[in-house]
Amino acid sequence: MRFSRTSKALGLAAIAALALSGCGAGGTAAGSGTTGGDTSKVILVDGSEPQRPLMPADTNEVGGGKIMQMMFSGLVSYDPNGKPVNELAESIEGKDGQNFTIKIKKDQKFTNGEVITAKTFVDSWNFGAAAKNAQLSGSFFESIKGYDEASAEGSTVDTMSGLKVVDDQTFTVELKQPESDWPLRLGYTAFVPVPSGALADPKGFGEKPVGNGPYKMADGGWQHNVQIQLVPNPEYNGARKAKNAGVTFKIFQNDDAAYQDLLSNNLDVLQTIPTSALKNFKSDLGDRTINKPYAGNQTIAIPEYLPEWSGEAGKLRRQALSMAINRDEITKVIFSGARQPAKDFTAPVLDGYSDSIPGSENLKFDATKAKEAWAKADAIQKWDSNETFTIAYNADKGGHKAWVEAVVNQLKNTLGIKVEGKPYATFKEARNDATAKTLTGSIRAGWQADYPSLYNFLGPIYKTGAGSNDAKYANPEFDKAVSDGLNASTVADGNKAMNKAQEILLQDLPAIPLWYQVAQGGWSDKVTNVDYGWDGVPLYYNITGK
Amino acid sequence: MTTYILKRFLQLIPVFLGATLLVYFLVFSLPGDPIVALFGDKPVNEAVASQLRAQYHLDQPFWVQYLLYLKSIFTFDLGQDFSGRPIAAVLGEVFPVTARLAIMALIFEAFFGILFGLIAGLRKGKLFDATVLVASLIVIGIPIFVLGFLLQYFIGVQLGWAKPTVSSAATVQDLILPAIVLGLGSFAYVLRLTRTSVLENMSADYVRTASAKGLSRFKVVRVHILRNSLIPVITFLGADLGALMGGAIVTEGIFNIPGVGNRLYRAVLSGEGPTVVSIVTVLVLIYCLSNLLVDLLYAWLDPRIRYDS
Amino acid sequence: MTPDENTSKHGAAALVERHHEHFVADLAETPLQATDRVKEDKAPLSLWGEAWRNLRKQPLFLISAVLILAVAAVSLFPGLFSGIDPTSEACQLANSDAGPADGHPLGFTQQGCDVYARVIFGTRSSVTVGLFTTLGVLLIGGVMGAVAGYYGGWVDAVLARINDIFFALPLILGAIVLMQLPMFRANRTVWTLVVILVTFGWPQIARITRGAVIEVRNADFVTAARSLGVSKFGALMRHVMPNSLAPIIVVATISLGTFIVAESTLSFLGIGLPPSVMSWGNDIQAAQASLRSNPMPLLYPAIALSITVLSFIMLGDALRDALDPKARKR
């Protein structure tokens, strides 16, 4: 994630407002506030083997991320609707959007008894940022003053000058420049405190992490490639108090196997129904399912460095492609409703979302207009009819093949051009081509929010030179519009400005938005009170036995 | 014979060097930067990436990487995988599970393949022969990921005779269904090989002689036909043991078995060189040993076969 | 022995009961047969000539030949068998998983493609992959295995160990590496797949061949031929190989099917044929997602695949019968 360096002050009120409002559809069986149920049950859920040692700042994928979220508690956490809720923070204040004073609650402890003070936070963040510690999520600290020095290659500086301990309960943060939405990011895993033992021996700690969250790891709880056992932390007093006797993550190699286990009651909760069961799961599970949109989407990015996709002709062609895709049909037929047709570049669960931004008609299926736009483009620059337009995807995970094929067929049928899916054997091969600007056609791109805001779906992906800008889109007008959004003085204005920026995107279409992610999961008849968070992850702490 | 066995063990040295070199080279040639992939679709932090590259020697030229790996083997420290675990520990976890699975699959395919093949051969052209032909066609024509899924769904979920996935202990009982699925593909080979071999031997001189001498049909079949028909079957089974151990990616995926195939697959996808090479090296050693065993069995089954000359 | 003599002998033997009256094997299957053949000059040719004569008379061969010709015809001229050309008429999602309809006898896939047309048009790539991979592994594996088993000693040591190394190479690793070579990267076709499957498929045939040759090389008729002055290589080609073929044929015919299926598994992993190439394997793999709700699109390509494999298995059986002097009489 990369953040704007041009944003200005924006009151703390706006921060909360950038967060999600509670417009999620809510679970079918239970809301998060539901009480009752058997709290003595250990819940068996699906997980995947963490890629890296379990250090919060080194964990950037879902398998380890879920565990870290449950074992650690940071300054804030997000409630089911994505609103930040104070956990360890007593208060976070920063009038100018650049200097923040953070007060933490008293008598907070890790499960090994170590007391959490302001210094714990400062040390943990410094550790995450310093290059010599090679933490994957280090760049989450990049807004803090002194990050560049600490994170430079071969740097011996291991502290950031922007962090200062005032007393045991207080520390201050100075950013490089005003970034008013900065406190909103503090719910992300990289910002949690870690005990001093972790900094001395990160490798050993990564095997047996000790945290301060609602759960702690059972003795010998991580059986690699088999399961990870978490038990409640009795000392935890935050908003996510465990309502069960523990959560065991059974490691699965694929969702199909997990689904079969769910059907035979060998698994309590399955986060994602596999595509092979989309047509059957409702009859298999009855009302023990959930269908709830979360902050993620799927797009097809089209690099502007390809000559036939640049300039006015390229823009018209991208509009033609977009209007040639029948999103309603694909989400219904291929996904059985597990996706929602996209109407913008963000996600509907976010505050400020609008499904009727001017230009959103470019995302509606209209064969006639699509053909017209294509013909117009041809008049400017002829499309070589022997050329094949490719949609690249990675075949190793994610199950993208079916929908890519469906899109391919629709484009062929509507526009009469040659279109093909282009599978990459591995994700890393795909990433390589995307970052090295060696793509020969379009590539699918999914985005899961790191923190709940419209900006997170726009800035890091479409701003000039942004780290995840696969299309290599560069439009100063858009860049300015996004900056305006971060500089706005009221919430509504900020969101309005972000949506103004989206109007530009909806015309240029550096990526073609396809659909929003929908969390579609199921559970066994042994458990109840299952609901999902804003990020599509079940609220494990809330699940009880029946 | 002892000299022969000794020679074969000495051959393991060049095999080991050749295999590690070749596999390391293949992993080295894999497209994409494994460290970049660790960042997912998040921006890559170059300082961190170069640290990690140095940690896994990925910044070194191929020869240096390979020699460093060889050195790590001779110091009995195979290095670490991306999650920071010693590779030796990983090997110790995955091989016992897959060995159980592979041996069970081998027993299954050998027993039923030889039994059915023998009967089919003795009753060539009869109903039984035709039935097993159709059965083997099903096994050949439908991929393992479909057959495995169906068996798992009907036997595991619908009938509840077995757990659909393997428990953390991966006990023999848990592995029965996966072993059958894994062995099904090879079952067709064993069956057809036995049948053909039996057909060939039934008309051989010694079988006719034995029948003419008045030996019971059972004894003729057991001593003369079966024993002499086993050489191609044994050859196949010996080669198959290794294939079952390394090639169980799909079966292990269906039944969620934490074994060799799964770990190897993940290591290849993420480009973890030392993990891949270590696993494959063990596999090569298993191949060599099973091949030696097969060669010794030849001599036992057919005394005319000599190696010492 | 002249062909005539042989046939008459054959006829006579066929009349003999299973329990033979004479306890001495008849001439055709003693080492004498081999030595006789050596004296005649035309041995290799007449061996195959003989086999052909026998083959033509077998009903098994005739059935398999008809089936194979049918498969070949479908591969070469799919347009003759299907009114719909799925290469130009793309699939309509509106027809997703629909049952049989007018002009669409086998119904539709999840993507709304006509199953019948896809099975017909998928024949060519699937059969190409199966057939040419099998031929390739037979050639490489057969030679390597035969030489290793027959010559033994250090030749065996070197070849068999190379075999071991290749056997252990994970197909997926090799396939990913080969696929990114510049010559394959831009243009992935069925031939790319054939090269990959041959590269990693030959060790199995090599092992089987080696085992079969080791079994035969010490047989009396080989020793006899050698003592009568047949060169070492000549004995391999004329006496050892024809008598080692049975297990090789069995493994090759079944492998033909497994190679077609392997294509499907590789497609599943993103390293098989590109999705735009129609093949049974691609279709089987795609249909797996809706296996429980609509198994038909999976069943039909699997049946086509099974029929193809069946015809080659029958051909193999017939060929083996024709080549093997002992089994031929039965």
Image (spheres, rainbow, N blue to C red):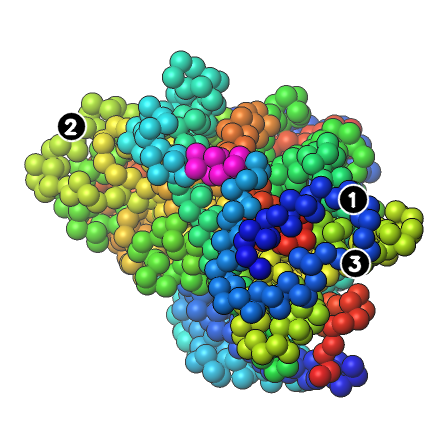
Mark 2 — residue? A372
Residue A58's disc is none
- Which residue is rendered at x = 32% and y = 30% of the image? C79
Residues at discs 2 and 1 in contact (Cβ within 8 Å): no
Q: Mark on residue C18?
A: 1
- Local packing at callout 3 (Cα closer than 10 Å; few below 14, some 14-19, many 20+) is few
Helix, strand or loop under label 3: loop
Using the image as rendered, state which of residue A320 and residue C187 is in the foreground: C187
Subunit bearing disc 1: C
Where does residue A525 sit, x and y in percent of width and height? 74, 28
Residue bounds of the magenta highlight: C62-70
What is the quadrant of the C terminus of chain A in the image?
Answer: top right
Decide which of A464, C268 is in the foreground and name it.
C268
Q: CA distance from mark 2 to mark 3?
A: 89 Å
- Residue C24: give its label: 3
Q: Which chain contains the residue that carries disc 2?
A: A
Same chain shared by disc 2 and disc 3: no
